[in-house]
Amino acid sequence: MYLGLDLGTSGVKAMLMDDNQRIVGSASGALDVSRPHPGWSEQDPADWVRATEQAIAGLKATHPAALAAVRGIGLSGQMHGATLLDADDKVLRPCILWNDTRSFREAAALDADPQFRAITGNIVFPGFTAPKLAWVRENEPDLFAKVRWVLLPKDYLRLWLTGEHISEMSDSAGTAWLDTGKRRWSESLLAATDMQERQMPDLVEGTDRAGTLRSELASRWGLGNGVVVAGGAGDNAASACGMGTVGEGHAFVSLGTSGVLFAANASYLPNPESAVHAFCHALPSTWHQMGVILSATDALNWYSGIAGRSVADLSAELGDTLKAPAGVTFLPYLSGERTPHNDAGIRGAFAGLGHESSRVVLTQSVMEGVSFAIRDSLEALRAAGTTLSRVTAIGGGSRSRYWLKSIATAFDLPVDLPDDGDFGAAFGAARLGLIAATGADPVATCYAPQTAETIAPETALVSAYEDAYQRYRRLYPAIKGVAT
């Protein structure tokens, strides 16, 4: 058996997988987020340990024999969080999370230093780890002086599990301290935030062995000795391992609260000017690009509240037959936008409203607006040298047949739907645990699920969608000056 542990923002998920990659069972422990000031988002690392213990206890209660057979553990986790430890490995303050924006000034200052984009291949976003340390240096100098270790959230769990200070490439690429092309810490970027490489964990690949489960925990959980802990991955890279998105040209689009277009690459292809993330993948000698929009299903949920109808009712009213764009354009920038604009201040808009603009037309425009926003990410990936021939759709929004047809037609690419199953970050982490424990081939292990169905572009509407997309593209610069 192999165990995947995924440390998310709202909980820890533990998943058991056998050596045929069949999911045996899963359990979870809940987490809360503390927001002591506007724009702040924090968690106590002790709560991560508590939630992990809760999840393991759930598995022990329902699958004790399977848990006892675990030989490898893989870790996945929310990225970018700054977990600060002193020389005795004691936590100095609550972890500053990925969605904390307090360091926006520090991020802008670091991003203005050309070496950051040149070495990391990325814009320095406020959510990244380096600007958080710059904020601590300026605002909590006594605490900053005590920092001996900076760990990412899942790597704090590793320290508790194994006693080792280790991270891996995919998660570390989101710190703004990694030389992403060379897959090593950058001394010059660390120095720019008054940090040193000795304060960083050792680096391994996500498929490597990265510690052994402490005997105390193995005994308490009913496991044997010598359980290997893999390097693991950041959450999106782990999900890609679960989806089999590891080879050149493979990609998925995730329609969740936010939207993600994730493409695996065999080489390092940065394009920071388009706000595309260029990170190391969890597998050796692979990288990935990722475009992110901040409101995907969140936009439809928002409109549902305004319209006074459930999302299910709105979708049913729209039907499954794709319609030509009706002339109303929706910009889904409800909380700013990441790719391609990197604009925290921009806000959304409806344009082209008329007396004839019915609720059905507005529902249609919301779905189209999200499709066009993700098309922006596709264009940004193309500008960085990535060519896609198809994508796989995951996430809650992929249950909408209309939305999938809209995306396929906006992309002019086929969209595959996987067979039912859980192919998320915990499953990907379990796969990495299997590879680390057995030496299995990483690419062969991280295969894609069977395709249940393929949604083809509506050929007759591709031209109309292209016209509507170009109209969508013209609206951002038109409203930028008045919407910030």
Image (spheres, rainbow, N blue to C red):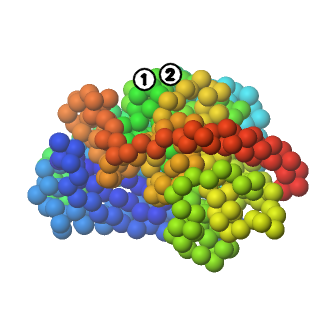
Task: Give x and y (percent) for residue 128.
Answer: 61, 45
Work out which residue is located at the far front of the displayed protein and give it: 460
Q: Nearer the viewer, residue 144 or 275?
A: 275
> In this orientation, does residue 234 appear?
no
Work out which residue is located at the far right of the displayed protein and give it: 481
Q: Nearer the viewer, residue 389 or 132?
A: 389
Of marks 1 and 2, the one in the foreground: 2
Q: Which mark is residue 319?
A: none
Q: Pointer 1: residues within 10 angstroms few (<14), some, or many (20+)?
A: some
Residue drawn at x 41%, y 36% is 245
Task: Give x and y (percent) for residue 165.
Answer: 40, 41
**Tag 2 residue:** 267
Q: Is residue 467 rendered to the left or right of residue 185?
A: right
Amino acid type at mark 2: Ser
Looking at the rendered structure, the secondary structure element under dot 1 is loop
Task: Give x and y (percent) for residue 413.
Answer: 53, 36
**Tag 1 residue:** 285
**Where does the C terminus fall, quadrant-wise?**
bottom right
Residue drawn at x 71%, y 32% is 273
> In this orientation, does residue 384 appear?
yes
Which of the marked residues, 1 or 2, is nearer the chain's N terminus? 2
